[in-house]
């Protein structure tokens, strides 16, 4: 498998250090607010990566942390007249709710920073003992950036350019503006722990170095996160871990691209900040997940409701084809004709295309293209009167159905029963457009009654009323079904 490594700025062949086993660590959330679409993207990207590696028979040990002590959490706790602990607990619970609905598998290891204070203190002490860090009179500990020669290797920045932009904030006792905090001495109103430098709390970067080494060992096979973490967070993690251990921290560094909102950078100040919950108010969680894999994970992703609508149409097409496939397979008497060779050959190409795309730096966008090829192929089989009743056609449809079950477990979409998905989607669209589903059902019963009584004027009137509400009615052998136009 080819995987883009931020460290080498190129695609490399990914093989785990220990055959058959992958150690993977992804930086999790700072639990001070509801998760936004950027978190959703990162979660889905690495969830697909874990699922795909497992589908290849690799045993993946996956750790994702929670930052539960941090400036932002403390600020939020003070604003809400609460404690850091209560704030982080609340937003970790919200994280699980959102991620479960997005069909994100739980990580094997989900450490919280506050569970690793002892390990962080040990690491900071070791860095002081080896000359890579120093304590200040007020009880802060800083990493001495110039003591670690490769600093900047991940982000491609050099010290001179960083020096030019670095400032020492008032009250900081840094030797060098480049240095970053490993430990922060106690300030009033903050949670603190005892340390050799007096009471205080860890700096943000330290936790990932301490937890990943403790839980997974060095080197990691894959360290991941959003692109915004490359600098300074991951650069600092590398400095801490490699300076302390003398070992390589991670063999692969994988970063997902940004999410833009209507082509603008998402930020709270621009007011274009979208939480996962906001989006679930608009579309089904599975539609959001599908939308997030429609572009390659390293590309910027442009979020808009129009883009969600497009994704919704796309996934609906897949489910409609799967539902129709189910119906055809359930209700057909088969004639003993084989499928034309070119059709089975086309299907084989699409199947290998899916895996080639996934092997090529997890290109889900291209992989989905092959799935749509299968949807079209199923459509061609079902539209062909002869083929749809032949054993050959049946074999193609069954193969496509089985493929989708396999891809569903890798992509985490297409795993709902087709009829259920279509009904749920219809109800979501109805709610979005203010259509009262129970009123529609009532009108359909009245229409049925009118038709039974041969009152065609009334049944036509009801049909027009439904149409004016934006409801489409289709009569099937099983009765009338409705959808939102
Ligand atoms: Zn981290």
Image (cartoon, rainbow, N blue to C red):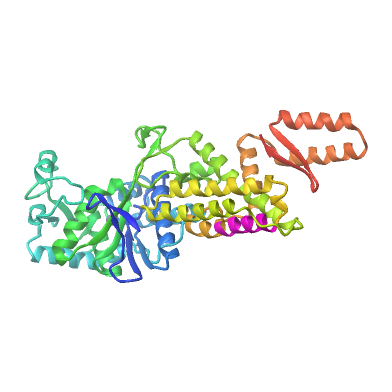
Q: Is residue 402 magenta?
A: yes
Q: Residue at x 61, y 42 (%)?
A: 428
The answer to whether 280 is drawn above or below residue 106 in the figure is above
Q: Is residue 407 magenta?
A: no
Q: What is the magenta segment's predominant secondary structure?
A: helix
Residue 197, horizontal then vertical, whole percent: 14, 62
197 sits to left or right of 392: left
448 sits to left or right of 1: right
Residue 54, horizontal then vertical, whole percent: 42, 65
Front residue (pair 291, 192): 291
Q: Residue at x 17, y 53 (%)?
A: 181
Q: Point out the residue furthest to the bottom here.
A: 19
- Residue 144: quadrant of the picture: bottom left
Residue 43, horizontal then vertical, whole percent: 41, 53
Quadrant that contains the N terminus: bottom left
Q: Residue at x 22, y 52 (%)?
A: 8
For the record, the magenta segment spans 391-403
The answer to whether 396 is drawn above or below residue 318 in the figure is below
336 sits to left or right of 43: right
Q: Is residue 121 visible?
A: yes
Quadrant that contains the C terminus: top right
The answer to whether 283 is drawn above or below residue 111 in the figure is above
Front residue (pair 201, 351): 351
Q: Point out the residue furthest to the front here.
A: 341
Quarter, ligand 1: bottom left
Residue 443, horizontal then vertical, whole percent: 79, 37
Q: Is residue 289 visible?
A: no
């Amino acid at each position: 498998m080819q995987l883009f490594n931020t460290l080498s700025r190129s695609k490399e062949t990914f093989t785990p250090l220990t055959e058959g086993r992958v150690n993977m660590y992804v930086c999790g959330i700072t639990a001070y607010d509801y998760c936004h679409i950027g978190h959703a993207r990162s979660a889905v990207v690495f969830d697909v990566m874990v699922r795909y590696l497992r589908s290849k028979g690799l045993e993946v040990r996956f750790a994702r942390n929670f930052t539960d002590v941090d400036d932002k959490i403390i600020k939020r706790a003070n604003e809400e007249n609460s404690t850091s602990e209560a704030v982080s607990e609340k937003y970790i619970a919200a994280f699980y709710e959102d991620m479960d609905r997005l069909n994100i598998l739980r990580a094997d290891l989900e450490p919280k920073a506050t569970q690793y204070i002892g390990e962080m203190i040990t690491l900071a002490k070791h860095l002081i003992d080896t000359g890579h860090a120093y304590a200040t009179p007020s009880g802060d500990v800083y990493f001495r950036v110039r003591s670690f020669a490769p600093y900047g290797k991940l982000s491609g920045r050099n010290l001179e350019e960083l020096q030019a932009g670095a400032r020492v904030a008032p009250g900081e006792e840094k030797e060098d503006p480049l240095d970053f905090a490993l430990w922060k001495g106690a300030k009033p109103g903050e949670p603190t722990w005892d340390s050799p430098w007096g009471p205080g709390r860890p700096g943000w970067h330290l936790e990932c170095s301490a937890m990943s080494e403790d839980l997974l060992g060095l080197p990691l096979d894959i360290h991941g996160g959003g692109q915004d973490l490359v600098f300074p967070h991951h650069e600092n993690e590398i400095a801490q871990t490699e300076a302390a251990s003398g070992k390589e921290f991670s063999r692969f560094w994988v970063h997902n691209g940004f999410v833009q909102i209507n082509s603008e950078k998402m930020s709270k100040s621009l007011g274009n900040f979208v939480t996962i919950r906001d989006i679930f108010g608009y579309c089904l969680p599975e539609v959001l997940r599908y939308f997030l894999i429609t572009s390659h994970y390293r590309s910027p992703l442009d979020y808009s409701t129009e883009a969600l609508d497009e994704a919704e149409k796309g996934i609906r097409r897949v489910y409609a084809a799967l539902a129709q496939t189910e119906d055809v397979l359930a209700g057909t008497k088969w004639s003993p004709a084989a499928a034309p060779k070119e059709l089975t050959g086309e299907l084989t190409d699409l199947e290998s295309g899916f895996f080639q795309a996934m092997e090529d730096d997890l290109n889900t966008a291209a992989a989905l293209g092959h799935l749509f090829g299968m949807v079209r192929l199923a459509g061609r089989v079902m539209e062909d009167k002869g083929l749809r009743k032949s054993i050959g056609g049946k074999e193609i449809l069954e193969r496509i159905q089985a493929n989708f079950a396999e891809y569903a477990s890798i992509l985490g979409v297409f795993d709902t029963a087709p009829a259920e998905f279509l009904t749920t989607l219809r109800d979501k669209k109805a709610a979005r457009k203010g259509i009262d589903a129970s009123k529609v059902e009532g009108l359909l019963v009245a229409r049925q009654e009118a038709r039974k009584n041969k009152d065609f004027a009334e049944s036509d009137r009801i049909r027009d009323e439904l149409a004016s509400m934006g409801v489409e009615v289709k009569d099937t052998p099983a009765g009338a079904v409705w959808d939102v136009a």
